[in-house]
């Protein structure tokens, strides 16, 4: 209604077409915001995203770029999504140099991060935790504001253990941190990465140097999930500060199951146990 | 009448030879359709050719005969006995009727007869067609392009000091006179931009003579290909792809575009970049990955790109450029630019997912894209018979609700006309169009390919002699113009000597550029890490420092 049918429109059903179209439009200087119904359906567009969008600027010697591209897709568990409506595919894209991968934890962050992503001069994959569409309620400022890409945010400070996550998982981790404090008096430092590629190593490094312990958690399967990257980098940077092995609390290495969802997901109890394990190890 | 006698004679032959044409049951002449007539004439022509195997074109009609080779029937072999053949047979035996009347087919009206006709103006012998020999007759010729697209007669005049034999205005009027009995060939002659002076001097030839430049460029491209292919064999560059056989598509297309038209190519379209002004040095710089390469040495040779010339840097994955072209066209549309986006790709690429998505998007969203498929018969070793069973690529246009046009890609005049019309259509209608340019890939797919392993070198030989775009234009340029003939003094546009010196000059220029490209150093190591993002991120800065530290420890190990 606001911008007209030629600027906001449906396309034929083809994710590779949508992604390619967005790239071409942006290559000519336009801003293209492509919406993919579910992150699970990004894969037909994988070639366009990884082989084209990510390399567009680099391969042309910076003559051409498609920085105007932002691809939005809902991701994550929703209670009844099963294999193809629950995936968190951030790791595939975070493994691709040239892309920016971002995931907001709630409405307020979503607005700021999305505005920044749209205006970014690099192609951004913007993953939106779908469970938050209905569930999350927050005060969102009305004006224009941006949250910088590549910067993590410390949501709460603590001295005992660093807890890192992104997207909808932050709510789960917040609950786990609350439980840890109520039951064991553990003070957790909770960090939202916000951007996965490039990710804010400094903030997490600073925190782990202080606490000596790290718990990373994500819904995506544990093997080669983004938690592995965080773990590897932090052990490299904070080896001498670490007092316990880094804990990863993630989905199992199975396709996302429907009826078994509540067993599958890394809930607040599994995270509580991981927090405890880290703390116990260090004592 | 001559024709009916011929028909009856052929009927008998057809009945025995081509059992597939069941309609020749009783009264042969009466049951012959136009198609069969085409086949008849073609077969008759082929009968006379001693070196030809008649099996190629009859393959479609007589499956019971002996095993047929998948060869390119050399269409030109019978140019002498059939000055303007009614049809031409391509790789795998696909026979297509020829028309000298350009017509863009939209979904409202399709070509009749089952096979899209090939638009051609100049035959293999370098002469414009006798349109009465057309294998496909269409009464209406759409003139999509407006009068302002056609260079006005005598607008610019010849450059001063130009050899009078190179005078395009004279050539044009001679040709119009020569083809006086064929009004629409005459029309096309008077409109064709190759036969008009350019409004501005071309930087490389320092002249406004379009035809001379077109020929020179085809020679230049061919010389560049030959020499760089050898350079790869000598280990001086790592990889190369030639475009031998497709020069008319490149130059003909480029000559009909405007500089604001944005180009998305696959990898065998260097001639377009050349026409727009990419210098020999720039081509070499990219192939040698040296410090002057615009792409900073990041990609393999032949992966050219130029923002200044509105040509997007190509990538290796096939077909990814098609949806890009659609998005770009849409942008041009919203910006109300007087421009189209042009997308080139091969026959193999037309099977790829992105092809289908792109065409559907372009049609549905109404994007002014000119899709140009270079159907050259092979996708590496896969001949078109293993690629599709439909009528080539252009027939798919109808399915997507799009306009289509098939053209003889080896006829530079037809290519120029076809793209002129296609561009005008796309711009005026703000809709896409699919152009299929029929040609033949004379070279290997790339330097990593040895095509003798999957096709008869005889086939390639025949094509390079009889169905070559450069040869064809050369025939045109070296044949005498009628006014000069009237003087009893045969004066062709170019003499054989002149052609030889053009070839030699271009070759020398290429060799000179290779030498300088080779001696330039490699790009600075900083280009390894730059341009991944608009601004270098902390993790890349860190990695760059790591590399520097490492290189300091091993100063001799990592020489450029």
Image (spheres, rainbow, N blue to C red):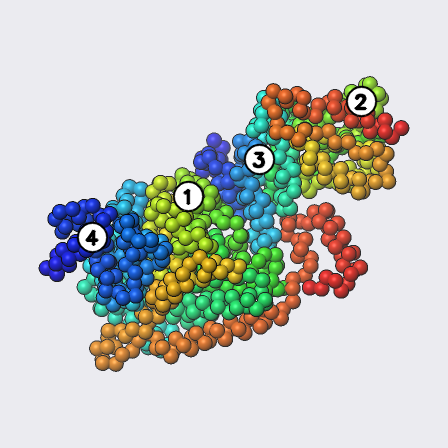
**Disc 1: which residue:** B359
Q: Is residue B355 visible?
A: yes
The numbered mark 4 sits on a residue in which chain?
B
Query: Tag 3 or tag 2, which sits nearer the N-term?
Result: 3
Hey, which quadrant is residue A146 in on the image? top right
Write the residue at 82% across / 25% down: A276
The answer to whether tags 1 and 4 share a subunit is: yes
Q: CA gap, disc 4 to disc 3?
A: 65 Å
Q: CA gap, disc 1 to disc 3?
A: 24 Å
**Disc 2: which residue:** A180
The answer to whether tags 2 and 1 share a subunit is: no
The answer to whether tags 4 and 3 share a subunit is: no
**Disc 3: which residue:** A72
> Which one is in front, B53 or B102?
B53
Write the residue at 80% across / 42% down: A237
The numbered mark 3 sits on a residue in which chain?
A
Mark 4 Cα within 10 Å, few/some/many (few <14, many 20+)? few
The answer to whether tags 2 and 3 share a subunit is: yes
Query: From the viewer's perspective, is the residue at label 4 or at label 3 nearer?
Result: 4
Residue B133 left/right relative to B292: left
Q: CA gap, disc 1 to disc 4?
A: 44 Å
Mark 3 Cα within 10 Å, few/some/many (few <14, many 20+)? many
> Which one is in front, B124 or B233?
B233
Position of residue B372 measured from the top left corner of the image (x, y, whole percent): 40, 52
Q: Residue B16, which numbered label? A: 4
Residue A179 left/right relative to B434: right
């Amino acid at each position: 209604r606001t911008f007209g049918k030629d600027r906001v429109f449906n396309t034929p059903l083809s994710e590779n077409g949508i992604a390619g179209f967005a790239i071409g439009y942006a290559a000519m200087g336009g801003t293209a915001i492509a919406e993919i119904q579910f992150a699970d359906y990004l894969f037909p567009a994988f070639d366009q995203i990884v082989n084209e969008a990510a390399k567009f600027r680099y391969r042309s010697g910076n003559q051409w770029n498609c920085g105007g591209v932002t691809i939005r897709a809902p991701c994550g568990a929703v209670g009844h999504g099963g294999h193809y409506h629950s995936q968190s595919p951030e790791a595939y894209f975070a493994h691709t140099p040239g892309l920016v991968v971002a995931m907001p934890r709630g409405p307020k962050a979503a607005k700021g991060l999305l505005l920044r992503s749209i205006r970014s001069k690099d192609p951004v994959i913007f993953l939106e935790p779908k469970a938050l569409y209905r569930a999350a309620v927050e005060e969102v400022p009305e004006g224009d504001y941006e949250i910088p890409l590549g910067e993590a945010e410390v949501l709460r400070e603590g001295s005992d253990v660093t807890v890192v996550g992104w997207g909808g998982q932050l709510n789960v981790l917040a609950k786990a941190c609350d439980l840890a404090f109520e039951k064991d008096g553990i003070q957790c430092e909770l960090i939202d990465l916000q951007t996965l590629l490039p990710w804010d190593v400094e903030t997490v490094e600073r925190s782990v140097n202080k606490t000596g312990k790290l718990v990373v958690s994500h819904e995506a399967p544990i093997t080669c999930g983004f938690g592995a990257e965080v773990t590897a980098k932090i052990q490299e940077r904070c080896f001498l500060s670490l007092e316990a092995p880094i804990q990863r609390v993630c989905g199992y290495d199975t396709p996302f199951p429907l009826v078994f969802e509540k067993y599958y997901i890394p809930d607040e109890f599994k995270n509580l146990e991981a927090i405890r394990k880290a703390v116990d190890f260090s004592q | 009448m001559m024709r009916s006698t011929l028909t009856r004679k052929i009927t008998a032959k057809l009945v025995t030879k081509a059992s597939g044409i069941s309609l020749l049951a009783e009264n042969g002449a009466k049951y012959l359709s136009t198609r069969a007539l085409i086949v008849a004439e073609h077969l008759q022509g082929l009968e006379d050719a001693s070196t030809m195997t008649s099996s190629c074109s009859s393959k479609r009609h007589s499956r019971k005969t002996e095993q047929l080779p998948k060869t390119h029937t050399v269409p030109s072999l019978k140019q002498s006995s059939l000055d303007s053949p009614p049809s031409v047979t391509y790789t795998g035996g696909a026979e297509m009727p020829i028309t000298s009347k350009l017509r863009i087919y939209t979904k409202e009206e399709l070509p009749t007869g089952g096979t899209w006709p090939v638009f051609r103006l100049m035959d293999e012998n370098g002469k414009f067609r006798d349109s009465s020999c057309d294998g496909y007759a269409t009464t209406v010729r759409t003139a999509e392009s407006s009068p302002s697209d056609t260079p006005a007669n005598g607008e610019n005049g010849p450059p001063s000091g130009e050899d009078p034999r190179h005078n395009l205005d004279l050539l044009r009027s001679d040709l119009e006179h020569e083809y006086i009995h064929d009004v629409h060939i005459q029309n096309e002659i008077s409109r064709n931009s190759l036969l008009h002076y350019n409004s501005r001097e071309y930087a490389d030839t320092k002249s406004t003579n379009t035809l001379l430049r077109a020929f020179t460029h085809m020679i230049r491209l061919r010389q560049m290909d030959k020499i760089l292919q050898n350079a790869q064999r000598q280990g001086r560059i790592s990889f190369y792809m030639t475009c031998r056989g497709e020069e008319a598509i490149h130059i003909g297309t480029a000559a009909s575009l405007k500089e604001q038209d944005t180009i998305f190519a696959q990898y065998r379209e260097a001639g377009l970049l050349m026409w727009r002004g990419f210098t020999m040095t720039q081509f070499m710089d990219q192939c040698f990955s040296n410090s002057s390469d615009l792409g900073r040495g990041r990609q393999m040779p032949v992966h050219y790109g130029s923002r200044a010339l509105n040509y997007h840097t190509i990538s290796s994955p096939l077909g990814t450029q098609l949806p890009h072209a659609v998005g770009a066209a849409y942008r041009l549309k919203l910006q109300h630019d007087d421009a189209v986006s042009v997308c080139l790709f091969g026959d193999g690429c037309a099977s790829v997912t992105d092809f289908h998505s792109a065409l559907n998007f372009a049609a549905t969203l109404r994007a002014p894209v000119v899709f140009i498929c270079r159907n050259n018969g092979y996708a590496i070793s896969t001949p078109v018979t293993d690629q599709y069973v439909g009528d080539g690529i252009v027939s798919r246009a109808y399915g997507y609700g799009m306009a289509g046009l098939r053209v003889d890609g080896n006829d530079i005049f037809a290519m120029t006309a076809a793209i002129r019309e296609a561009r005008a259509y796309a711009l005026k209608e703000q809709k896409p169009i699919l152009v299929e340019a029929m040609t033949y890939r004379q070279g290997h797919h790339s330097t990593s390919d040895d095509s003798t392993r999957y096709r008869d070198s005889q086939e390639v030989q025949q094509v390079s002699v009889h169905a070559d775009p450069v040869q064809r234009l050369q025939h045109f340029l070296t044949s005498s113009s009628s006014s000069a003939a009237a003087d009893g003094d045969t004066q062709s546009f170019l003499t054989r000597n002149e052609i030889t010196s053009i070839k030699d000059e271009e070759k020398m220029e290429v060799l000179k550029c290779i030498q300088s490209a080779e001696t330039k150093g490699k790009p600075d190591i900083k280009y390894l890490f730059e341009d991944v993002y608009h601004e270098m991120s902390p993790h890349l800065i860190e990695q760059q420092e790591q590399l520097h530290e490492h290189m300091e420890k091993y100063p001799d190990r990592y020489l450029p």
